[in-house]
Image (cartoon, rainbow, N blue to C red):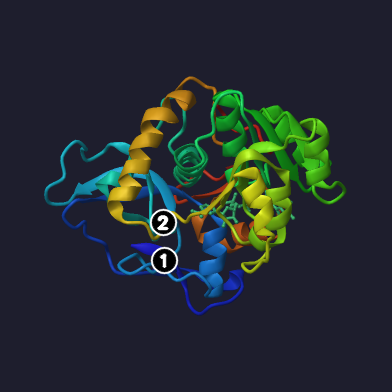
Amino acid sequence: MYAITINAPGGPEVLTWTEVPDEEPAAGEVLVEVAAGAVNRADLMQRQGFYPPPPGASPYPGLEVSGRIARLGPGVSGWAVGDEVCALLAGGGYAEYVRVPVGQLLPVPRGIGLVESAALPEVATTVWSNVFMVAHLRPGESFLVHGGAGGIGTMAIQLAKAVGARVFTTVGSPEKAAVCRELGADVAIDYRTEDFVARIAEETGGSGVDVILDNMGAKYLARNIDALAVNGRLVIIGMQGGRKAEIDLSALLNKRAAVAATTLRSRPLAEKAAIVAAVREHVWPLIAAGRVRPVVDRIVPMREAADAHRLLESSGHVGKVVLSVGEEPGTTPPGTAAP
Ligand SMILES: NC(=O)c1ccc[n+]([C@@H]2O[C@H](COP(=O)([O-])OP(=O)(O)OC[C@H]3O[C@@H](n4cnc5c(N)ncnc54)[C@H](OP(=O)(O)O)[C@@H]3O)[C@@H](O)[C@H]2O)c1
């Protein structure tokens, strides 16, 4: 089989479509013939040598795929060869075949194409587990997601809106603000020209937001706590703005606020399976009903993964960039992927 390999840590040019040994599913796994994968920020870090695969994971990048089950490993039931699936991975998605633990398989949601469905597993599991299982966002509460036009952001806006929250987001341009409002954001704040803390204070009558999903880490830590409401919950999932910061704990104490930080990739299989099951129960029906959709910026041939990495690095995308193995590359206008 062929896979994208990383010859040595470096720029996008180190991603090479290479012949590699075939994969065999172990007990409790299936082998998926990949139709498409999708790009995540973590893949960029792995390529640069900053985010090595966890022990036992494939050395190839790729945290999610869609495709058809090609083979069942020993002890697998409930799935059949030929089933169309998408899957959450600890690695190995930039390849023609990938081994997947059964607990990380999802059926392709009703109404979604096989290739487009590769854009769903990572964002659906990350947003559901953090915003709903950790921060317990409830109907009627307010929610801020930073980077609303990114992969995580486009899913977070839609899910928070679907459960009846008031949704705030930050974006890097007026065009991206428009996409976020179309997805359901009530307030889109341009982080290049506006102070999000002041704008949230203004919009909420000074009370702040109940839940924040943060991708920036250190750079926004103090400001996020300022923007939180009493009993607010901040969940940090990214460190795009650095990993070390100082905060005034009295701000947290006075607000009785909570700060959590999580990562999905290195969690035990049982935890990932529980998250995947919760996503199937709560998110998949919203997708099947057309209330939540994958936002696919474009579909790039997987062998040209380097171009997809350049696009993410320049923040030139909206939503997800999908890597197609077959003959289905093409472009959909930002924010308008088929529901
Ligand atoms: N912990 C986990 O388990 C987990 C899982 C998945 C993803 N993540 C993290 O979640 C983050 C988003 O991932 P993604 O796949 O959605 O990546 P992405 O599509 O590349 O999105 C990155 C976003 O960051 C935004 N951004 C850049 N500078 C910003 C700033 N100063 N203020 C606010 N937003 C800013 C960009 O906004 P503009 O394009 O509008 O400039 C863009 O929307 C990444 O940090 C990733 O590592 C974590």
Sequence-earlier tag: 1 or 2 = 1
Type of amino acid at the residue the image marks with label 2: Gly
Residue closest to the eye, 4 or 153: 153
Q: Residue at x 54, y 33 (%)?
A: 137
Could one spot residue 319 in this view of the protein?
Answer: no
For the C terminus, the image quarter is: top right
Which residue is most to the bottom?
8
Q: Residue at x 37, y 49 (%)?
A: 34
Which residue is most to the top?
289
How far, Cα to Cα, is label 1 from label 2?
Answer: 7 Å
Residue closest to the eye, 63 or 143: 143
Which residue is most to the left?
75
Could one spot residue 93 in this view of the protein?
Answer: yes
Circles 1 and 2 in contact, beta carbons < 8 Å: yes
Residue closest to the eye, 115 or 186: 186
Q: Secondary structure at mark 1?
A: loop
Q: Residue at x 57, y 29 (%)?
A: 338
Q: Secondary structure at mark 2?
A: loop
Q: Is residue 164 above or below residue 190?
A: above
Q: Position of residue 13 (x, y in %)?
A: 59, 72
Dividing the picture into quadrants, the one containing residue 167 is: top right
Q: Position of residue 118 (x, y in %)?
A: 46, 43
Does 5 sit left or right of 192 as displayed?
left
Does 31 sit left or right of 295 as displayed?
left
Question: Which residue is under mark 2?
Answer: 93
Q: Is residue 182 above or below residue 271?
A: above
Type of amino acid at the residue the image marks with label 1: Tyr
> Mark 1, residues whose alpha carbon is within 10 Å: few (<14), some, or many (≥20)?
many
Question: Which residue is under mark 1?
Answer: 60
Does 253 sit left or right of 35 as displayed?
right
